[in-house]
Image (spheres, rainbow, N blue to C red):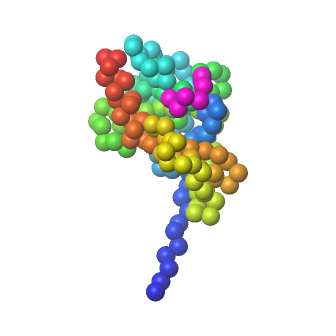
Amino acid sequence: MSTVKQADVRGVLISVAEGRILLPNANIAEIITFSEPEPVENAPDWLLGRVRWRGWRLPLMSFSMFAGWGKEAGTFGTKVAVLKALGNNPKLPYFAVLSSGFPRLVTVSTTNLQEVHDIKELPLGIYSKVMLNDDAAIVPDMLSIELMLDKALNQAA
């Protein structure tokens, strides 16, 4: 009988107003400097607009506003995390999330990651609440977020 040791995963902690998001490093396409987004008519308040990146016009969201944590706006020093979408939607291969500062690389293993929630208390767009060492973070439900972004963009069109 052999035991298989699970490998560590490289992750990224993205600071947003009132919290942190934990994602696999492979989800991050690039970190860019904030620039004022193009407005999207009739969009929910958490959809801040569209930003230009490598020929794309990406939807820029405030995760804090999406999760109901509070207001968040881009200012000098704000970064934007360009994320690879997972939903195979050809109209939405990437989207962007406002980050208050430069995201931090972390090592995630089964020994330093702990879930800290009751499944019933998680709002839409949040897959899990965790503690990574001493850092509280949430793991977003990427597919739900992508569906909400797609819905918001379609309604705004």
The residue under the point 42% across, 27% down is 58
For residue 31, say whether it is visible: yes
Quarter holding residue 124: top left
Q: Is residue 77 left or right of residue 98?
A: right
The residue under the point 46% across, 86% down is 1
- On whether residue 77 falls in the magenta region, the answer is no
Look at the magenta stretch and give its main secondary structure. Answer: loop
Closer to the camera, 67 or 15? Answer: 67
Closer to the camera, 59 or 135? Answer: 135
Query: How many numbered tags mark residues here?
Result: 0
Closer to the camera, 115 or 134? Answer: 115
Residue 98's place in the image compared with 27, above or below, is: above
Residue 81's place in the image compared with 38, above or below, is: below
Quarter holding residue 145: top left
The residue under the point 49% across, 45% down is 120
For residue 23, say whether it is visible: no
- On whether residue 71 falls in the magenta region, the answer is yes
Residue 111 locus on image (x, y percent)? 62, 64
Residue 3 locus on image (x, y percent)? 50, 79
Residue 81's place in the image compared with 72, above or below, is: below
Quarter holding residue 156: top left
* Highlighted range, magenta: 66-72
Residue at the farthest left position: 90
Q: Is residue 22 left or right of residue 77?
A: left
Residue 153 locus on image (x, y percent)? 35, 23
Residue 151 locus on image (x, y percent)? 34, 27
- Quarter of the image that includes the C terminus: top left
The residue under the point 39% across, 14% down is 42
Residue at the farthest right position: 134
Residue at the farthest bottom position: 1
